[in-house]
Image (cartoon, rainbow, N blue to C red):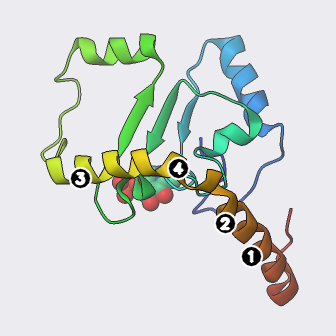
Amino acid sequence: MEPIQGEGGVIIPPDDYLPRLRQLCDRYGALLILDEVQTGMGRTGTMFACEHSGVVPDILCLAKAFGGGIMPIGATIARKPIWEKLVENPFLHTTTFGGNPVCCTAARTGGQAFPKCNNFRNVTVNLNLQQKRLKREINIPAR
Ligand SMILES: Cc1ncc(COP(=O)(O)O)c(C=O)c1O
């Protein structure tokens, strides 16, 4: 699930969307997998969009801004017990270019720099300004 559906029209869900998803997954023993390819790496004002609702997924997917928007790299992050299952068999998933040193260096460097980025305050300020502008100029409702 995406915390904010991107390609479908940047649909911002109600505040209880992720917490209720978490509850459902816990109740039925399902893994909560969040796709933060578009929303991750500070793009909603926190490092990951799920932080706004305090929800911790079981698996988190990253790409795009993870490589600084330039380097083609993605990542799958998982809770320790889930990750340990994945690494039991390292050949479960292989890729031709996976682990490319240049891309990994870009992602690592970006990852180290991101948390120092003024707590993403500029992103939040900019988001609010752009939402107001969209509402004013093309009548797209802001939340
Ligand atoms: C939210 C989201 N998830 C996953 C993907 C898939 O990324 P890829 O281009 O690496 O297949 C995209 C691509 O645009 C995306 O927007």
Name the one closer to the observer, 87 or 126.
126
The residue where tag 1 is placed is 130
User: Ligand 1, what quadrant?
Assistant: bottom left
Label 1, label 3: how many angstroms apart (C-alpha)? 31 Å
Where disc 2 sits, the SS reads loop
Q: Amino acid at mark 4?
A: Lys
**How far from the left and from the top, in percent, is residue 53?**
76, 37
Label 1, label 4: how many angstroms apart (C-alpha)? 24 Å
Label 4, label 3: how many angstroms apart (C-alpha)? 21 Å
The residue where tag 4 is placed is 116
Q: Which one is closest to the eye, mark 2 or mark 3?
A: 3
Image: 55 above or below 129: above
Say whether marks 1 and 2 touch (CB < 8 Å): no
Identity of the residue drawn at 87% across and 85% down: 136
The residue where tag 2 is placed is 9
Circle 2 packing at 10 Å, graded few (<14), some (14-19), many (20+), is: few
Q: Is residue 79 left or right of residue 12?
A: left
Residue reaching furthest bottom? 137
Report whether the residue tagged 1 is closer than 8 Å to ligand 1.
no
Q: Is residue 14 left or right of residue 113?
A: right
**How far from the left and from the top, in percent, is residue 34?**
56, 37
Q: Quadrant of residue 19?
A: top right
Quadrant of the snapshot with the N terminus:
top right
Label 2, label 3: how many angstroms apart (C-alpha)? 29 Å
Residue 103 shows which numbered tag?
Answer: 3
